[in-house]
Image (cartoon, grey):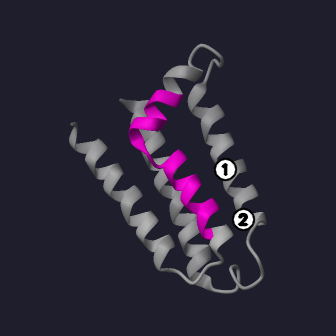
Amino acid sequence: MPEWIAYYQENRENALSSIGNMALSSSYQKELSLWVNRYLDPIGLFRTINAKREEATDPFERIRLQAERDLEFTILLANKKDRSGSNILLLESNLLLLFNLMLAHMKNS
C-alpha cells in the first residue's frame, strides 16, 4: 500500500475518533461519520473519481463540489447544541481541508 494512502486512512480514522469523542447528537454524529467514510476514504474516493471520469470532463471538481454540498447538508441536520461549540466548527473546517488536500494529491498524482 502506498505511504500516502496509509496517511489519509489514518486521517480518516482520527476524524472518526474525534467525532465519536465529541458531545454531539447521535443523528449528527452519524451523518458526520457517513460523510467522513464517503469522502475521506482514499480508496473509495479513488474509485469514485475513476467512475466519474466517463461522466465529467473534470471529475475532481465535480466531486469537490459534491463533498462541499454534502457537508453543508450534514451541518443542516445539527441541532443548536451541536453547533454551539467552537470545536465543531474547527472539526468541520478540518474535515473539508483534509478532503481538499487528499483530492489535490490524487489530482496531481
Q: CA distance from mark 2 to mark 1?
A: 11 Å
Label 1 crowd bin: few (<14), some (14–19), many (20+), radius 10 Å: some
Amino acid type at circle 1 is Glu
Image position, residue 18 (x, y; %): 45, 73
Q: Is residue 1 left or right of residue 56?
A: left
Image position, residue 24 (x, y; %): 61, 79
Q: Secondary structure at mark 2?
A: helix
Taking the spot 44% from the left edge, 31% from the top edge, the residue there is 46
Taking the spot 63% from the left edge, 86% from the top edge, the residue there is 85
Q: What span is colored magenta in the figure?
A: 29-48
Q: Residue furthest front?
A: 26
Q: Is residue 47 above or below residue 25?
A: above
Which marked residue is nearer to the observer: mark 2 or mark 1?
A: 2
- In the picture, which quadrant includes the C terminus? top left
Kindly report the secondary structure that dominates the magenta region of the rendered protein.
helix
Of 78 and 90, which appears nearest the observer?
78
Image position, residue 37 (x, y; %): 50, 50
User: For residue 5, what is the image quadrant?
Assistant: top left
Q: Which mark is residue 75?
A: 2
Q: Earlier in the sequence, mark 2 or mark 1?
A: 1
Dots 2 and 1: beta carbons under 8 Å?
Answer: no
Amino acid type at circle 2 is Ile
- In the picture, which quadrant includes the N terminus? top left
Q: Secondary structure at mark 1?
A: helix
